[in-house]
Every structure is written in C-alpha cells, then in structure tokens.
Image (spheres, helix red, strand yellow):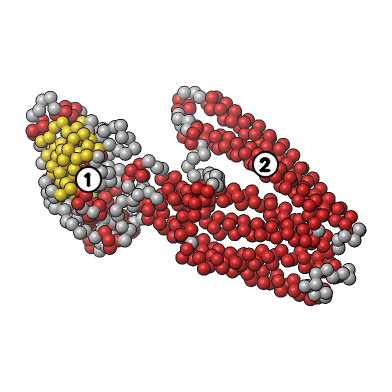
Amino acid sequence: MARGRGSLNSGGKQGEELPKAKITSQSLKNSSKLLKYIKPYRLKFFAGLFFLFISSLVGLSFPAILGSLIDVAQGTHKYKFLPDSLTAIGIGGFILLFCQAFVSFFRVVWFVQVAERSLADIRRETYFKLITLPMNFFANRRVGELNSRISADLSQIQDTLTTTLAEMLRQLIIMIGSIILLAIVSIKLTLAVLAILPFIVGFAVIFGRFIRKLSRQAQDKLAESNTIVEETLQGIANVKAFVNEAFEAGRYNSNLQEVIKIAVKGAKFRGVFASFIVFCLFGAFVGVIWYGSVLVSHKEMLVGDLTSFIMYTIFVGAAMGSFPDLYSNVQKAIGATERVLEILEEKGEDVSIHESDNEIKQRVDGNLIFDNVNFHYPSRPEIEVLKDVSFEAKAGQRVAIVGPSGSGKSTTAALILQFYHPQSGTILFDGKPADSYSLTDIRNQVAIVPQDVLLFGGTIRENIAYGKLKATEEEIVAAAKRANAHQFVTSFPEGYDTVVGERGVKLSGGQRQRIAIARALLKNPSILILDEATSSLDSESERLVQEALEELMKNRTSVIIAHRLSTIREADKIIVLEKGIVIESGNHEELLGNEKGLYRYLSQLQFEV
C-alpha cells in the first residue's frame, strides 16, 4: 500500500491552519493591490475608520470618569474640565457610553458592508478568471487547491478586512492612549509598569509560540494515526491477504505512543506557562496596587487616580496580549492575498464571460487540416507527444484515429478544441489557420463526446440543455429521442426533472453517454469528436449508444478516436498513430492490405480474440 506521508496536511482539510507569509515591504506592496476593490466603497470605509477612532477615544475616557467619581466622593476634584457633582459625572458617563454604542454600531456595520461587497467583487473576479484560464493551468493544479483559494483564502482576507485590521487599529489607539494617560496620571508608576509589562508580554509570546508548535506536532501525529486507520481499512483485503494485522496494529500503537509523548510534554509546558502567567500577572497587579498605595499614603496620588491607573494598565496589558494573534492573522491574510493574486495575474484565454460576446461570428463548414503539427505539453517539454502530424478531414467525412495508448490520440482532440496550441505546424479550419478564428467560434462549432462523461449534478433537462442554454422543451426532447435517451428518461418518475447526482452517479454509463450525445446534438456542431465513446459499455448499451452516435454523425465532420477497431470499419479515413507519428493512413480495406502494418496487426489481435 502507498503511504502518502508527504500529504498528511495538504488538501485544505477543515481546521487546517493557513500558511503565513513574512510581512515585508514587497508583500505589503502586493497586498495593497487588493485595495482597488475597496475603492468603490471608500466613503464608508473611511467613515468606519473615523468612527473607530472616536469609539476608541471614548473608551479611554471611562477609567478617568471612574477615578473622578471616586475622588469626588472623597471630596477631591482634580480634573477641572469635569463637573464636581457625582450625579453630573455619572450622567455624563452614561451619555458617553450611549454615544460609544451608537458609533460602534455604525462602525461595525460599515466595515462589514465594505468587506462583504469588496470580497464579493474579489470572489467574482477570481472565479471569472479561473474559468477563463487555459487547460494547462488546471493540468498543473489540484481542484481542491483552487477551491481552497476561493473559500479558505478569501475567507481569511474577509476576516482581516472586517475584524483584524479594525481590531488592530483599535488596540493600537487604546495602547498608545493608555500609556499617555498613565504618564499623565503618574509618571513614577508608569515607569515601574513599563519596566515589567513588556518582559511579561514578551515571555508570554515566545513561550506561547513554543506551546503552539508542540500542539501542532501533536495534531500532525494524530492526523498520521488517522491516516493509518484510513489506509488500513481501505486496503483491508491486502492486510488480511498478507497476514499483516500485527504489523498494522504495531504501527498504529507506535504512532499513538508518539501522540501521548508529545501531548504530555505539551501539558507540562502549559502547566509551567499557566503558573508563570498567573504569578506574573497577579504579581504585577499586586505590585502596582502596592506601589500606588505607597504614593497615595505619601499624598503623591489620589485614590481615584490609582483606580484609573489600574484600569489603564489592564488596557495596555490586554492590547499587548492581543497583538500576537492579530499579527498572526495579518500574516495569514498576506499569504492568502499572494495566493489569490497568483490567480488574478495569470494570463487567461480570450474568452468573454458575457454571453452576448460569445455568439458565432465566423461559421465553420467542417473542413479540418493538421499541417506538420508538433506538440508537447508545456508541463512536459521533454516529451514530444505529436511529431509532424498531418492529415485532412473534409466536411462531412468520418476520420478515425487509432493507435496504442499514449500515441497522441486524445491530444489531437484537445488541439482541435484549442485547449492547447501546437509549438509548430498549423491547424486549419476551412483552409484558414485556427488563430484567425476566435476561440469561442471554434469551440461553439466543435463538440466532444468523451469516454468518461461528466454530468453536472442538476437535472437531466439541465444537462442536455448545456449544449444550447436557450433550448426549448421541444428541442430538448427531440435531441433526447435522437440520442436514444427519451425512453429511459421518461421511465423515471420525475422524467426530465430527474436529478442525476454528482458527476451523474445515479445514471449508468450507457445512460450518461446518451445524455452527452443528446447534449452534442442540441449543440449541432460542424465538427464532432468521439473520444473512446463506447469503450467501457456492455453490449446492449453499446448498441443503443452506437445507434445514437450514427444519428449524431450524420452530415458533419466526425473525428473518431477508438481502441475497438470494430467501431470504425465504415470510416472514410483511418489515421494510425504510434508514438506521436502518423505511420499509416487509408480506409479499412487499404490498411488491412498492408501485411506489415500496425493496423492489420491490431485488427488481427482484436478480431481473433
């Protein structure tokens, strides 16, 4: 069994931490490119920032108000800008509290509105860019990875825009404001606090990071043990056949022991950390009260000032303690931004996302020529897939392409659809090079029925209508009848409203093929590609599908890729490919006449069987 060690934590599983990026001038410059999405909503964004500033300043006033209440109650009145009446100060405090609540409401709502709308714009543009990228882009990336960029990465950016940046600014204002007000209340006590607090916070951050690292190690080991369970149960037949139950049990037990070892080690450090934090925080708290009480006893400080000072100290400590997590979230958001920008900066195909721009402008009759085409996949430049391939298919002809696996048959189909472009040589439609047509003109007039048909998870009607989105009910039913699909569709209780399930799993292979043929009939292409369309079907399904294909191939150029040579005997021309080279060409009878030919050899193998 394969032991996919390297992929334990790759795949965007739920709860997986997003990778962080270093915050540098370049990464900040890259991330600033997303600010253009905030630009249409800048008025609300700046209004939210202003209200955030006001809300933070109002919050800073409450310790001073509380201290003044205590001082006025004791018959002293230090701050002349505040009234000397307990009632007046109390009512003023409630008015400020109401103002802060009012301002905070609009600040939160506006930030969320700006973030949601700008993120929707980014999601929309990212998705639009994705679906217009060339096939080579998708050949080199996993679907799960791309989906993660639209979901997890953009959600991280969303959290940063709606919460993290606002909270970071708020905590920064509170911290700076609190330090200034601490110094105003008592410079001696402030210097004492600032001498201790950074040490405690710094130690907490470093120690906390170490504990998180141990926690991640434990999670990774636990994930590894889960992988062992998954592999063992999936390959249980192999485990039993090779009598390896004891080996698998030992492997799982060994892994669990590692989990316990790391978890216990982490618990010890967490215990030390918790004890240290409790001692330091409460020690600092007691120290501040003790030193402040000394200053109060020496008449250097009022009791109300000491109360305000303690509250401002708590503000500073809380702000400092929140910065590591906020900074970590910003790092994740910058990493997410860079991954999203990778997609947005990719060069897409010349395909419009507006339906009206994709109408056919140049008609293709169906004449197709490959003229000395050489091609290798961009991801594998060392492997030449097609070498000087030349053939012609005239309008209405049936041209079959045969050959061993890996000879370049499906690549030829991909080139006809312009999924890729040859490195040299020319593909001509009606005598004109492919690049003289728009991509949409070619793809609108070429249809493919593949071996493994992918249906979307909606209804049968929706899947057939995918070939012509504006098709009427009569056109859909007519296409289904011509594809030998109407009978089985109407046998379902929901008929054409039957949901086919993900990838069409609720239908058999033959049924999926006939839906794909109906879709192609509705598209009414000039050039049809049949890529092993009947190779994986039973005899009865193959008969029904073959009848449907005969209907589909009428009066249009058909390029038939086949392993089973019995399906191409009637082709007007057969192209034999081997290792990317055209080694034979002719009709069935001509090729059988070549005693040393590959086609004759393959025919003898199949027909003898």
The percent coordinates of residue 30 (x first, y second) are 48, 51
Q: The residue under label 2 is which amino acid type? A: Ile
Three-letter amino acid code at the position of disc 1: Ile
Q: Residue at x 66, y 64 (%)?
A: 56
Cα separation between marks 1 and 2? 59 Å
Q: Tell me: 116 left or right of 137.
A: right
- Answer with left or right where residue 258 lies relative to residue 382: right
Query: Which residue, given by chain and number where applicable, does mark 2 sit on?
Result: 206
Pointer 2 local density, CA inside 10 Å: few below 14, some 14–19, many at least 20: few
Residue furthest toward the right? 297
Residue 417 appears in the figure = yes
- Which residue matches tag 1? 416
Residue situated in front as seen by the camera: 360 or 78: 78
Q: Position of residue 185 (x, y in %)?
A: 79, 61
**229 relative to 496, above or below:** above
Residue 141 or residue 4, whichever sits in front? 141
Q: Residue at x 18, y 57 (%)?
A: 362
Tell me which numbered mark, 1 or 2, is placed earlier along the sequence.
2
**Horizontal side of residue 231 vs 282, given as left or right:** left
Binning the other alpha carbons within 10 Å of mark 1 as few (below 14), some (14 to 19) or many (20 upward) gives many
Task: Please tell me whether mark 1 sits on a helix, a strand or a loop.
Answer: helix
Q: Is residue 474 above or below residue 425?
A: below
Residue at figure coordinates x 27%, y 51% from the top left = 515
Question: Which of 170/130 is in front?
Answer: 170
Q: Which mark is residue 532?
A: none
Instruction: Tell me if label 1 and label 2 are in contact, CB under 8 Å.
Output: no
Mark 2 secondary-structure assignment: helix
Residue 506 position, x and y percent, is 36, 49
